Image (cartoon, grey):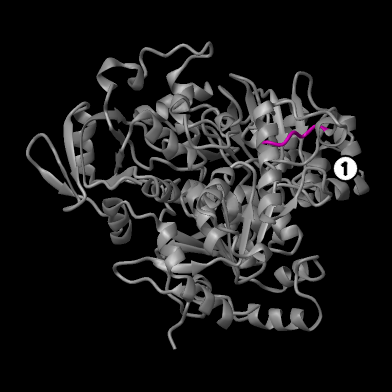
């Protein structure tokens, strides 16, 4: 995983609450055995009509969404299935951060493990972001803040170890493997 | 000594290294269930890094999500028609064979939905930590296990180290007083709970279902309740083990036997939350007030008693959900014409669910223009149902009787509802397109699903239960 400290991007706004992982990537795209190339399936049922043509009114099909790396979503984004294909699809499409007032647990975990930043902000900041689609934001992991175009800097919570892994490009598997002696000790003392 | 919750007891017994302010806990995993959809990329990581599976004796694989449910593609020598699904199944066969992982394969009489076969085999036991790359792993919490869904990266972590890095979640007591009325099921109760606490009400928490109504439930009913904990945002739900739990487990193939059984039961008796244990949150419901429930929107929190009317809201997301469903505020879902009935899924495809549906269907016919699919949760459930003659009741009524699998719950294997069509489904998610693009899902109990199949309309099943 590439280390990440800062992200500066314009935002795409999808105000729907409870955007579930079946919307982020429908189940029919999960019969894959790799993690690559899922960006084309991102939001497939919202992005394309029955004939496979892009729906012009869907935000990701509009010119102003091009190049945006930050997705501002309604409350409780990423609920539902544990499919890691959801963050894989978002990342493959080009997103690097998802911002909401509430982010579902498994989706948050999966995002962190792939370098997609889950950013939980307060209601007031969220309302401002929803009202200003396309605004330029700067996310800083050093300070755990989001800088807004109106000059405000708002902080967001990030689990310290996840933050360390993101900023240093450390993968958790390497960390777990380095604790082999602890695991062996546990297995010896908790024999079943 | 401080009074502890059941969750705290199970958690602390599995801390390889406790959490600190800087690092999450390293949590030991007793049982890792895996399937074809969320494991291929994890096995690839092991291969790339030259790592073995650490504990083959704690790892069990099966295939359920993308597998077909028609007999010919499983037993008749016909290749799996959906090519990507066939490749995924073959990849799991290769991965398990290469790494030495036990696989309950396509033609095994023990195969079924992963959350149905774990308990059925007696592999799911009180006090264990159980994970699977699937959010409905919460099902196993019905035994007093700490069971939760994980992503594919974490599947790799468990394969390689038998451990996960986890922050300790908060606790949430859901106490259900009184008893459910006749014709009101565990499914109706969990839908009512989700309606009460909301689809993100359990986020960051482990639920513990308690109270008289839970104690009175069979293991299969408790599994239905725990299964949908994730639909309230909670990764895990738990029920304290008791005599019902022990009676269910005793004699199952992977449960302890003989002297080990006695010792295990003694240990399991220590698991329930201590009197006076404090939970971070608490909610109390009265089971006597729960009615048969049905969803009307595009998440499981958009749910009503069958007697109720769809509420109105100025919220654009709410209105969009109703537009998707083709419903108006103020309408009753009861009485609506439906196209498909699905009895299946890890929520409601155990033998008691099929018996409930059969009780309504017995001697009756599926309504004209309605398609009914009955998909047992496992091959064992299928065999048991056939021994009781339930298959004949369904087939004579005009329903399709299938091989086990996840099937139309998520439509990965090609079993889908059809765009714009209404399905009364015993599954767990009514998200847009969950049962196939454009499908409109109404979540309900097996009784309500069967009643809808007979009348062709959303119907209170109590009309059929004299």
For the stretch drawn in magenta, the main secondary structure is loop
Nearest the camera: B439 or B334? B439
A70 relative position to B43: left or right: left
Q: Residue B461, position in %: x, y?
A: 72, 39
Q: Residue B100, position in %: x, y?
A: 69, 56
Asked if B401 appears above or below B185 in the picture, the reply is: above
Q: In the image, is residue B320 part of the stretch drawn in magenta? A: no
Asked if B24 appears above or below B49 in the picture, the reply is: below
Residue B171 visible? The answer is no
Quadrant, the C terminus of chain B: top right
- Name the residue at 28% across, 55% down: A163
> Which stretch appears magenta?
B66-70
In terms of image quadrants, where is residue B51?
bottom right
In terms of image quadrants, where is residue A139?
top left
Q: Residue A10, position in %: x, y?
A: 21, 29
Name the residue carrying label 1. B390
* SS at mark 1 in the image: helix
């Amino acid at each position: 995983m590439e280390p990440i400290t800062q992200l500066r991007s314009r935002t795409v706004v999808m105000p729907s609450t409870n955007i579930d992982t079946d919307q982020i990537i429908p189940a029919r795209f999960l019969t894959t055995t790799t993690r690559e190339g899922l960006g084309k399936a991102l939001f497939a049922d919202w992005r394309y009509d029955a004939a496979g043509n892009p729906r012009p009114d869907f935000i990701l099909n509009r010119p102003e969404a091009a190049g945006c790396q930050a997705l501002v979503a309604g409350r409780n984004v990423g609920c539902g299935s544990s499919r890691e294909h959801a963050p894989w699809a978002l990342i493959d499409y080009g997103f690097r951060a998802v911002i909401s007032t509430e982010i579902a647990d498994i989706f948050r975990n999966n995002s962190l493990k792939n370098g997609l930043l889950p950013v939980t902000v307060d209601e007031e900041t969220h309302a401002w972001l929803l009202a200003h689609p396309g605004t330029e934001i700067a996310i800083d992991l050093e300070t755990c803040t989001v800088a807004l175009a109106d000059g405000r800097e708002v902080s967001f919570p990030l689990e310290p170890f996840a933050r360390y892994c993101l900023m240093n490009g450390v993968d958790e598997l390497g960390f777990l493997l380095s604790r082999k002696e602890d695991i062996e000790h546990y297995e010896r003392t908790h024999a079943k | 000594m401080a009074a502890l919750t059941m969750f705290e007891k199970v958690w602390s017994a599995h801390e390889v290294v406790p959490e600190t302010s800087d690092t999450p806990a390293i949590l030991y995993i007793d049982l890792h269930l895996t399937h074809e959809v969320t494991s291929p990329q994890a096995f690839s990581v092991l291969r790339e890094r030259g790592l073995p599976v650490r504990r083959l004796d704690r790892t069990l694989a099966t295939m359920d999500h993308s597998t077909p449910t028609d007999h010919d593609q499983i037993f008749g020598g016909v290749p799996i028609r959906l090519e990507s699904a066939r490749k995924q199944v073959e990849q799991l066969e290769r991965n398990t064979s290469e790494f030495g992982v036990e696989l309950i394969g396509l033609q095994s009489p023990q195969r079924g939905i992963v959350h149905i076969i774990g308990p059925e085999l007696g592999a799911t036991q009180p006090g264990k930590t159980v994970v699977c790359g699937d959010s409905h792993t919460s099902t196993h919490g019905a035994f007093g296990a700490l069971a939760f869904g994980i992503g594919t990266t974490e599947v790799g972590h468990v394969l390689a180290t038998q451990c996960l890095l986890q922050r300790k979640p908060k606790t949430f007591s859901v106490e259900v007083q009184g008893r459910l009325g006749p014709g009101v099921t565990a499914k109706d109760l969990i839908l009512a709970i989700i309606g009460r606490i909301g689809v993100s009400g359990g986020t960051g928490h482990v639920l513990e279902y308690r109270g008289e109504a839970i104690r009175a439930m069979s293991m299969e009913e408790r599994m239905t309740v725990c299964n949908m904990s994730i639909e309230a945002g909670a990764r895990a739900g738990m029920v304290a083990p008791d005599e019902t739990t022990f009676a269910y487990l005793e004699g199952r193939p992977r449960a302890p036997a003989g002297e080990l059984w006695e010792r295990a039961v003694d240990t399991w008796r220590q698991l329930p939350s201590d009197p006076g244990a404090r939970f971070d949150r608490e909610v109390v419901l009265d089971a006597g007030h729960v009615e048969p429930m049905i969803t009307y929107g595009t998440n499981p929190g958009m749910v009503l008693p069958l007697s109720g009317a769809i509420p109105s809201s100025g919220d654009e997301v709410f209105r969009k959900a109703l537009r998707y469903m083709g419903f108006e505020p103020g309408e009753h879902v009861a009485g609506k014409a439906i196209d498909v009935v699905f009895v299946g899924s890890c929520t409601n495809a155990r033998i008691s669910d099929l018996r409930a549906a059969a009780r309504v269907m017995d001697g009756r016919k599926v309504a004209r223009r309605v398609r009914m699919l009955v998909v047992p949760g496992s091959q064992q459930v299928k065999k048991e149902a056939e021994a009781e003659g339930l298959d004949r009741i369904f087939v004579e009524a005009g329903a399709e009787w299938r091989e086990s699998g996840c099937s139309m719950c998520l439509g990965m294997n090609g079993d889908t509802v059809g765009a714009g069509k209404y399905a009364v489904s015993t599954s767990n998610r009514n998200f847009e397109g969950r049962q196939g693009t454009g499908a409109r899902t109404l979540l309900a109990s097996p009784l309500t699903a069967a009643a809808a199949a007979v009348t062709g309309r959303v119907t209170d099943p109590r009309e059929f239960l004299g």
